[in-house]
Each structure stands twice: as structure tokens, then as C-alpha cells.
Image (spheres, helix red, strand yellow):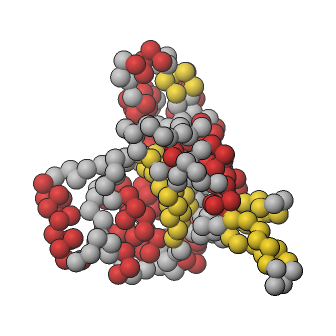
Amino acid sequence: MITSEELTQANQKCQRIVEQIGEVFVGQPLLLQKLLAAALADGHVLFEDYPGLGKTLLVKICARVVGCDYTRIQFTPDQLPSDIIGTNVWRQQHGTFELVKGPIFTHILLADEINRSPPKTQAALLEAMEVRQVTIEGHTHVLERPFVVLATQNPIEQEGTYPLPEAQMDRFMFRLSTGYASTLEEESLILSRRIQWRKDDPSDDVQAVVTRDEFVELQRIVENEIYVDRSILDYISRIVRATREHPKVEVGSSPRGGLSLLRASRSMALIRGRDFITPDDVKMMVTDVLNHRIILNIEDSLEGVKEEEVIREVVSQIPAPTEFEPRG
């Protein structure tokens, strides 16, 4: 069981991570908290957003701040699986094959425009995203922790793209959007920081606030030290089951959606300085965790109904537990 001192130290590290990212990236603090929550829960994130909103910069800063390696893959239609995971290369001078690792061997991977590569190449990511390992010519190679995939896709440009299959979408913990600057002040702040940096990419100047080992320890705390009351488990289960029974939904959330919601809520509890989940943690995470895991009926989809609207309606109809044990 985690002590109050250890909990305070872990929470302070989380706060420093969010604050350090916010020193460079102009955006809503809640967005940064959700990105951190996904990484702490060992989950992947799909950014579905328009070009030029700082997604690449955000990922690079995040990797720097948590002391991890970072690699970017620009997906293209002619890309092969070996371009991502690597291959064995014959070295004539030594008379042996040498493993040349691909860019997937990193801690934080930016899969830029992931839907521009063909399905065979997209499938090369599936094993890595699910079990943190890759298979190259029959040999399995375990990826070092942490391993987090942050992928992007343009929601309006469909020409020359390949829609992500449902199996791959389900492996992303969150579908997030950075969005435009919400106020004139934020828009001006973006410009003034560019003048201050004197360059477009200031990520090289960002200092880490934790080491990789410290970040892995935060992941361990989220997985093993955050208590979940039985009433919270029932609350999550009712929400997930209700998405399958909603009249506007053709296919509801999978059980993996419930597991992702549980893990994300644990992360948010730590970020908020608690060693137990509350219903508010679940409500804060539920839309971003489930919005890409349900398929609407074609009629309702054509009428403009959004997945987020259905999820909000589901949550509003399920009473949150009012009595639960903060600690078992």
C-alpha cells in the first residue's frame, strides 16, 4: 500500500510534467492531463485533428519532459511493415545476419498520418500496441517500457487514405483533439512564444522533469496502488453495457473499452492526488475513451448524431455511486 508521502511525491511529479509541457504548448490543461493519463496507464492515443495544430510539437515535448526516447514515422502509401519494425540484413564481411531495428523500438512513437499507409503496414503496429513486442522473421523482440503510440489522422482529407480497422481503433485508449486556440489571448500567446523561441521547434531546449525510470515507477503506482471500490467497477460496467443497448448504436463498446476506462480513471486519480477512484474520474475520461469504440446506426449517423452525444446521454441516465469506500 502506498504511503501518503509517496502519493504526494508521485502527484507532484505528475504536476511538474503537466506544467513543463504547458510552458511550451499552448492548450487546455485538461488536454495535457488526459495525455499524461494515457501514458501513465500504458495506453495509446489517436489525435484526430486538422493540420497545423501542434500535435507533433506536443508529442516531442511530452517525450522530452518524461525523459524518454522519441521517434516519428511519417506514414505513406508505399510504406512496408519492415520500414516500421525492422529486418535482418546480411553482413557479408561477417557472414551473418544482423538485426536492424526499425523506428518502433522507442519509448514514445509518433505515427503521423497513420491512415495514409496500407492495411498491411498498419497491422504491423497491432502486435506492438497490444503486447509491447514485435516479431521479425519468426523471432520475438520485447519493446522496452514505456511504449506509447501517439498517432494522428486528418478527419477531413480522405483521398489516398486507408480507414483504420475497428480492431486497430480499439487499441487506442483515447481519441483526442487538440483543437484551435480557444481565446484570442491563447492565439496571441502562440505567436509571442514563437518570437521568444526564435525557431519553430523549441523541443531541444525542453528539460526533463523526471527520468524514464521514475516515469515507469509512476506507471507501476497507477497499476498497483490506486484502489477501486466495487461500486465504481459496477458503475463502469453499467456505462459500457448501456452503449450496447442504446437505440442509436449499432455496435457498442467492447470489454476493452471498460478496461481502458478503468485504467484511465486510475491515472486521473493519481494526477488529482488521490490513491482511489471517484465517479468524477470516470465521468472525466468516459467520452474520450469510448467515442471511437461505438458505431452508430447509419440512419442516425446521416442525421448528424455524434458518438459524443450518445455517450453523454448514456452517462446522464446512469446514477453515479454516492457511497463508496475510498480505501478497502
Left or right position of 292 against 157: right
The residue at the point 55 percent across, 21 percent down is: 250
Tell me residue 93's x, y (percent): 81, 85
196 shown above or below 220: below
Q: Quadrant of residue 170?
A: top right
16 shown above or below 292: below
The residue at the point 66 percent across, 46 percent down is: 120
Left or right position of 153 against 304: right
- Name the foreground residue: 186 vs 222: 186
The residue at the point 42 percent across, 55 percent down is: 34
172 shown above or below 223: above
**Total count of labels:** 0
Q: Quadrant of residue 231?
A: top right
- Name the foreground residue: 319 vs 259: 259
- Name the foreground residue: 219 vs 23: 23
Tell me residue 41's x, y (percent): 55, 58
Tell me residue 297's x, y (percent): 49, 19
Point out the residue furthest to the right here. Answer: 95
